Amino acid sequence: MAQRTKKVCTISYGCQMSERDAETLTAISAESGYRRTENPEEADLIIINTCCVRESAENKIIGKIGQLKKLKERNPYLKIAVAGCMVQQPGILKRLQRRASHIDIWTGTFDHHKFEELLHAANEGQKIALVSSDASDTAEVVPLAEKGKLKVNVNIMYGCDNYCAYCIVPYVRGSERSRPKDTILKEIRTLVLNGCQEVTLLGQNVNSYGKKDKFPYDFSDLLKEIDTIEGLSRIRFMTSHPKDLNDKLIATVAEGKHICEHFHFPFQAGSNRILHAMNRDYTREYYLERASRILKEVPEARITTDIIVGFPGETEEDFEMTLDLVRTVPFSQAYTFMFSKRSGTVAARLPEQVPLEIKKHRLQKLIELQNAKSLAWRQKMLNKYYEILVEGPSKTNLEQISGRTRGNEVVVVKGSEDLTDTLVNVKIVSANSWTLFGILD
Ligand code: SAH
Ligand code: SF4
C-alpha cells in the first residue's frame, strides 16, 4: 500500500531573520519527506518558530503552544517542534517544558543543522530538547529554497555585538559573524536559477558586514557584486544601524541597478539622553545628517524606521524630541513599539520604568502622527508611474493583484493573476496610510 505523504505546517513569529530560520527548518523537513501545508489541522508536524524581542510576542506564542494541545490529543501521531529565540533565552527551557509537556522537540537558534536528527528521534517516540549555548560548533545550513519562490531572505551575517540596552537579540543569537562573499553569491545564483527575482539581505547591522571578520571587502562591495547577477530584479537589505551607515553605501544604492532605494534605518529615540542610555552610539544630530544625506544622494529613497516609546527614564520632553524627529524626517513608514522589559538586558534593571498607561498614550500619539505622515508620503505618489513586482492575487479582492514598488510600498491593481512574478508599470490613482491603488500602464 502506498504511504500517505506527511505534511508540515510552520508558524513563524518575529523578524525576517526568524522567518528565514523557519524557511530553513521547513526545507529540512521537506528533505525528510514532508510536504508543506498552511493548515495545522492536517499536519503531521507543526513547527512553531518563536520570537522573544518583546513580551507581547512571547505571550502570543505561549497561547499558541497551549492551543496545540487539543490537536495533539486528537492526533497522537502529530509531532510538534518549538524552535528559535524564545527557547534560546538563558534558563527558560525547563519552565517551558513544565508548561507544555505535549511538545516533542525544543530547539534553539544554533541547532538547525541537527533538526533532521531531532525529527527522526521524535518520530521514534522520544521527547527531546537541544539548545546549544553558542554558535561555535554550528554548521551552516542553507537548504535551497523551494523552486519558483519569487522573494527570498538571505542571511549575510548572524548575531549582534551592539548590546543596545533594551535588546535581547545578542543573548539569543550570539555574537556577530559574517558569511563570506562567495558563499552568499553562490546561494543567490542558485536561488535565481530556481526562479527567485528578489533577495533581501539580512543582518542585524548590515553596514558592519565583514568588519569583525576582517574581510577585505565591505557591505557595499558585496552589494555591487550581487547587482551583477543576471536574472535578479531586486536587491533589498536590512537593517541599517545608523552608527555604521557610510557615504559609500549611500553612493552604492544611488548607482545600483537592481538595488532598491529603501533604507530601513531605525532611530529608536529622538533624545540624545535616551539614545545614550540605550547604548545606540549616535546622536540625534548625526542621525538627521545621515537621513538628509540619503535623501540628497538618492532622491527616490524611502526611509523607514523603528521607534521605541517609554524606555526607562523617558520624560515628556524626551518623547517630544521623538515626535519632533518624526515630523522632521519624511519616513514612509515607522514600526513603533512600547518598551518591553527583557530579562537579562541592562534596561530591564533600570529604575524609573515608565508606567504602562503613559507608554500606551505616547504610542498612540506617535502612531497618529506617523499615519498622517505615511498618508502624506503616499499621496505624493499619486498620478506618478512605478514599477511593481507582482506577488499574486490581492488578499481582499480576487480580481485584483498586489505587488510592491522598489520602495517596498504595497500596490493593489486590477489585473489578471497571470501577471504574478512579473514586473509591470502602474500609475498610482489613490492611497491610504498602508496601501496604494493603481492601474496598469
Ligand atoms: N538590529 C535592528 C533591530 C532588531 S530588533 C536594529 O538595530 O535596528 C527590531 C526592533 O524591535 C528594534 O529596532 C526595536 O525598535 C524593537 N525592540 C527591540 N527590543 C525591544 C524591547 N525590549 N522593547 C521594545 N521594542 C524593542
Ligand atoms: Fe538589538 Fe541593537 Fe543588535 Fe539591533 S543592533 S539587534 S537593536 S542589540
Image: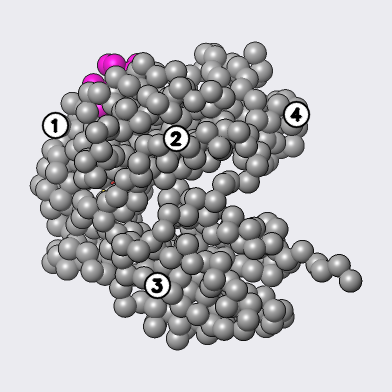
Q: Cα distance, mark 2 to mark 1?
A: 36 Å
Q: Cα distance, mark 1 to mark 3?
A: 42 Å
Residue 179 in the image: x percent, y percent?
A: 36, 44
Say which residue label 3 marks: 131
Earlier along the polypeptide chain: callout 1 or callout 4?
1
Quadrant of res 341:
bottom left
In the image, 190 versus 227, the foreground residue is: 190
Earlier along the polypeptide chain: callout 4 or callout 3?
3
Secondary structure found at label 3: loop
The residue at the point 41 percent across, 58 percent down is 139
Q: What residue type is labelled 1?
A: Glu
Quadrant of res 44:
bottom right
Say which residue label 1 marks: 285
Say which residue label 4 marks: 418
Instruction: Tell me the mark number nearer the camera, choosing from 4 and 3.
Output: 3
Earlier along the polypeptide chain: callout 2 or callout 4?
2
Secondary structure found at label 4: helix
State the extent of the magenta-drawn residues as a range.
291-299
Q: What residue type is labelled 4?
A: Asp
Residue 435 in the image: x percent, y percent?
A: 54, 33
Q: What residue type is labelled 3?
A: Val
- Residue 365 visible (yes or no): no
Q: What residue type is labelled 2?
A: Leu
Instruction: Tell me the mark number nearer the camera, choosing from 1 and 4.
Output: 4
Instruction: Tell me the mark number nearer the camera, choosing from 3 and 2.
Output: 2
